Image (cartoon, rainbow, N blue to C red):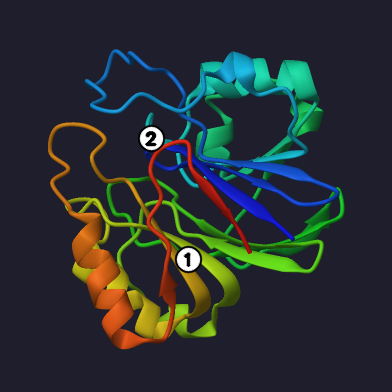
C-alpha cells in the first residue's frame, strides 16, 4: 500500500513500504510573499525522513529553497527538478538531479518519468509520473490541460484546481477524461487570496464522469491506495 498525505497547497508526502517522497515543499506558515489562509499541516522541522524531493518549477509556492535545504541537510534526500528550480537551492550538488521533459530514469528504487506541464508563467515547468513499490502517481504541479495527458496512466493523479495560472475545477475534471487514474486528488484551493476554486465542484464533476474516484482531502489528511 501507499499513503498520500496533503500538507497544504501543493505539498504532499507519499509513503510506501520502502520509500518516503516529498512533492513541492512549501511549509512556511507565514510566508513573506502572500498571506496563507490555511497553514501547512507541518513545518519543515517536522520532516524527518525523505528519500526524494520532487520540485515541479521555481515559483515560491512550489519550491521553498529554505525548507528544501534544511530537509536535505537532515535526510540526505535527492532533489529532482528542472535546473531553474534547483539553482535556487543551496544544497550539495550531488543531491541535485536536474531533469527535462521526457526524461525517464530511476533513483533510489523509484521509477521517474518527467512529463509536460503547461504553465507559461514559469521558465521551465514539469510534472512527474512516479512509480514505487507497485504504486504509481501523477503529480501535475501547476499546469493547464494538454493533449499528451492521454499517455498518462496511474493509480492516483494529483491535480491543481486553483484557476488563474493553472487548471480550475472544470479544467482538472476535463483533464481526467484524457488521462487514466483510479483516484483523483485536487490541491491548491483555499490557500491564499486570488484562489477561489471550490473542491465540491471538482468532486461533483469527477463523480459524474465515473472514470476516476475523487478524493478530496483536508490539509493534514491522507488516504491509502
- Left or right for 105, reference 159: right
In x, y percent, where is residue 160?
34, 55
In the image, residue 8 above or below residue 1: above
Marker disc for residue 211: none
Residue assigned mark 1? 116
Viewer-nearest residue: 28 or 183: 183
In the image, residue 171 above or below residue 29: below
- Disc 1 secondary structure class: loop
Viewer-nearest residue: 118 or 33: 33
- Left or right for 12, reference 93: left
Which residue occupies 30% across, 64% down?
144
Which residue occupies 57% across, 19% down?
44
Residue 100 in sight here:
yes
Residue assigned mark 2? 59
In the image, residue 76 above or below residue 115: above
In x, y percent, where is residue 80?
66, 43
Which residue occupies 79% across, 69% down?
134
The picture quadrant where one finds residue 110 is: bottom right
First of labels 1, 2 by sequence position: 2
Q: Are marks 1 and 2 in contact (CB under 8 Å)?
A: no
Amino acid at each position: 500500500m501507499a499513503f498520500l498525505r496533503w500538507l497544504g497547497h501543493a505539498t504532499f508526502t507519499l509513503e510506501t513500504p520502502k520509500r518516503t517522497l516529498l512533492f513541492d515543499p512549501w511549509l512556511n506558515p507565514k510566508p513573506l510573499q502572500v498571506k496563507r489562509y490555511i497553514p501547512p499541516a507541518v513545518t519543515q522541522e517536522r520532516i524527518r525522513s525523505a528519500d526524494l524531493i520532487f520540485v515541479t518549477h521555481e515559483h515560491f509556492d512550489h519550491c521553498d529553497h529554505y525548507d528544501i535545504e534544511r530537509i536535505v541537510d537532515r535526510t540526505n534526500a535527492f532533489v529532482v527538478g528542472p535546473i531553474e528550480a534547483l539553482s535556487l537551492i543551496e544544497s550539495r550538488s550531488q543531491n541535485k538531479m536536474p531533469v527535462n521533459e521526457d526524461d525517464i530514469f530511476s533513483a533510489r528504487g523509484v521509477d521517474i518519468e518527467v512529463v509536460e506541464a503547461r504553465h507559461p508563467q514559469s521558465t521551465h515547468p514539469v510534472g512527474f509520473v512516479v512509480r514505487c513499490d507497485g504504486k504509481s502517481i501523477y503529480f501535475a504541479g501547476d499546469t493547464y490541460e494538454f493533449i499528451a495527458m492521454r499517455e498518462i496512466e496511474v493509480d492516483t493523479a494529483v491535480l491543481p484546481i486553483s484557476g488563474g495560472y493553472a487548471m480550475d475545477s472544470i479544467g482538472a475534471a476535463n483533464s481526467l477524461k484524457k488521462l487514466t487514474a483510479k483516484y483523483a486528488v485536487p490541491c491548491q484551493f483555499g490557500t491564499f487570496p486570488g484562489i477561489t476554486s471550490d473542491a465540491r465542484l471538482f468532486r461533483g464533476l469527477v463523480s459524474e464522469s465515473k472514470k476516476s474516484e475523487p478524493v478530496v482531502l483536508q490539509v493534514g489528511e491522507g488516504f491509502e491506495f
